[in-house]
Structure formats: structure tokens, C-alpha cells
Amino acid sequence: MRFHSPMSASTPTPAGPLVAVITGASSGLGEATARRLAREPHARLVLVARREERLRTLAADLTGLGATVTWVAADLTDDDAPTRVRDHVRAEHGAPTLLVNNAGAGFRARFGSERNGGFANHRKTFALNYDAVLRLTEALLPDLRAAAPSAIVNVASVAAHVARPGAGAYSASKAALAAWSEALRAEEAPHGVHVGTVKPGFFPTEGFPATELKEGRLSRLALGDQDDVAEAIVQCGLRGKDERITPRFYNAAIVLQGVLPQVIRRVVGSDRAQVLATKTVSDE
Ligand SMILES: NC(=O)c1ccc[n+]([C@@H]2O[C@H](COP(=O)([O-])OP(=O)(O)OC[C@H]3O[C@@H](n4cnc5c(N)ncnc54)[C@H](OP(=O)(O)O)[C@@H]3O)[C@@H](O)[C@H]2O)c1
């Protein structure tokens, strides 16, 4: 296992055992990431999410494949969640070498909508997609530094660059996460903690089923695959990549947003683009 950081660039990186904390491991990308990381030699994994039965089943499955897997059932927005995760990791595995901040939700609602919208929806979205990430990272950072070379991967989104109606809170939370992730990379490099950011486009999961996109012959082409995104997490977490946008063709949307934002505005504002404001399970 190799990590990239200024500290490790000039000296050979010791191949230490992988101790990975994966949030949102009960479904979708988090589960796919756990399955992928379990294939690393001597992998030790800590699965985190609210649905304990799911974590228990996945842990048993991955343990059968040879990994050492434990779990913490926690709502990451709870005050005591970060210390509960930290204490569990210390007690069961020692210091973590990888933190994957993946848990997140869509909470779609228009800001002016009396139903689920407004500032309350922004607070709810930020509590999970941004605040909870920072709080867990803060709790684990001393141990990640102690275990350096180590890594943190933050799962943002292409939505950090391209905002759609009904997804303003989501986009804002992911843009904040992506910006913070950039700063943290520079801050933690001297400590040997590499920070990577993964920005997926649409990929169908339980929480983000993308039903509207699956139904169209053309829109279906915009869908990625959770296993490819899990591989992008591995590229950032274990191979020292700074950022991965996946599927790669979403790079074009990000570049276009930078150089010709009026084109993106016209597309996003059009009636036909309403299909892009896909429904998610957390909308109600
Ligand atoms: N799918 C896409 O199109 C897409 C695109 C770009 C970015 N992303 C990002 O990718 C990440 C994974 O999403 P996904 O598509 O895999 O969705 P998903 O299947 O809904 O998975 C979300 C995970 O987060 C966990 N979670 C939700 N609220 C939580 C809370 N309060 N405390 C602890 N865990 C919580 C859920 O577990 P419990 O319900 O058991 O707690 C679940 O394991 C998210 O950050 C999402 O924003 C997804």
C-alpha cells in the first residue's frame, strides 16, 4: 500500500496494514467501497451508518472473504457520534490509516417551497453532508496523523460545480465540502495525511435511484456505476490521487461551467432539464 504526500514522496512509504473507516457503508457507494477495500491484503474495516442490521450482514459477508470487519451503528449528526467512532476504532483496530467520508443525502427541495424547503432544509443538509464530515475528521485526525502515511477521502459531487433547481442545498453542501477538502489537503500534507476528493456524477443507488434518468434512452448514458466510483475512492485513498471525477465525461460539464457558464445556465434552466433534478429517498 502506498500513500502520496510530501513526507512520503522522498522516502519509501512503509506498507502498513489498512485500517479503513467507511461512513455510509450500509448501502450504495459506501457498501461498494467496503467490498472493494476488503480485497486489500490484511484489510481491517470499520463500517459506519444508522442501519445496524445492514452493517452486521455486510461485516459477516466481508469477514468470510478474509477481512477483519467491525461496525458502529450511529447517526453521524448526533453530538456523540465522532467520539463513539473514534473510541471504537482505537479499541478494536488501533489508529486508522484511511477515512472515507461518504455518508450523505440529497434532501431535494426548492428554497421557496413551504414543504421541506428554506433555511431549515439547508441546515439539515449541511448537518449531514458537511458538518458531520468535519466533526468526524476532527475526531480522527490525531490518530490519522499518528498512523501517517494515511489518507482521508471526501465524497463530494459534480453538483459542487453545477447546481440544479431543487438541489441548491445539496450543491452548496458539496461545494463547501470540496473547497474545505482542498484546503485540508495542503494543511495535512506536512503531517503525512493525504486528502483526496471524489466528485461523482449520477450513478444509481438506493438513496439516489436516478429513476428519471434511467427511463430515457439518452439520459441513461449519463449514469455511472458505483463500483467505478469505489475504485476512484481507492485511487485517492491508497494511490495518492488528489481528485477523481467519475465518470470522466463529467469533466466536460465542470470545464463548461468554468469557461461558458451561460451555456450551463441555459441547459439547467430549461424545461427539458427538469429530469436532472432527480428524486432521492431523503426528499420527503
Ligand atoms: N448516487 C449518486 O448519483 C451520487 C452522485 C454524487 C455524489 N453522491 C454522494 O455519494 C455518497 C453516497 O451516496 P449513495 O448514492 O451511495 O447513497 P445511499 O445509497 O443513500 O447511501 C448513503 C449512505 O449514507 C448513510 N447515511 C445517511 N444518513 C446518515 C446519517 N445521518 N448518519 C450516518 N449515516 C447516514 C446511509 O446509511 P443509513 O441510512 O443506514 O444511515 C447510507 O449508507 C453521498 O455522499 C452522495 O451525496 C452520490
Image (cartoon, rainbow, N blue to C red):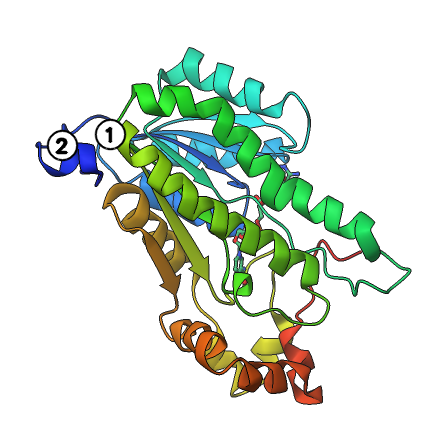
Q: Give me the disc on residue 149.
A: 1
List x then y, in percent, for residue 206. 60, 56
Place residue 269 in its image quadrant. bottom right
Residue 30's place in the image compared with 262, above or below, is above
Residue under the image location 56 percent in, 50 percent down: 176
- Report whether 108 appears left or right of 189: right
Q: Residue at x 54, y 86 (%)?
A: 263
Q: Secondary structure at mark 1?
A: loop
Label 2 crowd bin: few (<14), some (14–19), many (20+), radius 10 Å: some
Above or below residue 257? Residue 113 is: above
Task: Determine contact: label 1, label 2, CB under 8 Å.
Answer: yes
Residue at the image point whose x is 49% and y is 19% from the top: 86
- The mark found on residue 13 in the picture is 2
Q: How many marks?
A: 2
- Could you tell whether 53 is left or right of 60 in the image? right
The residue carrying pointer 1 sits among few (fewer than 14), some (14 to 19) or many (20 or more) residues within 10 Å by Cα, namely many
Hey, which residue is sitting farthest top in the picture? 91
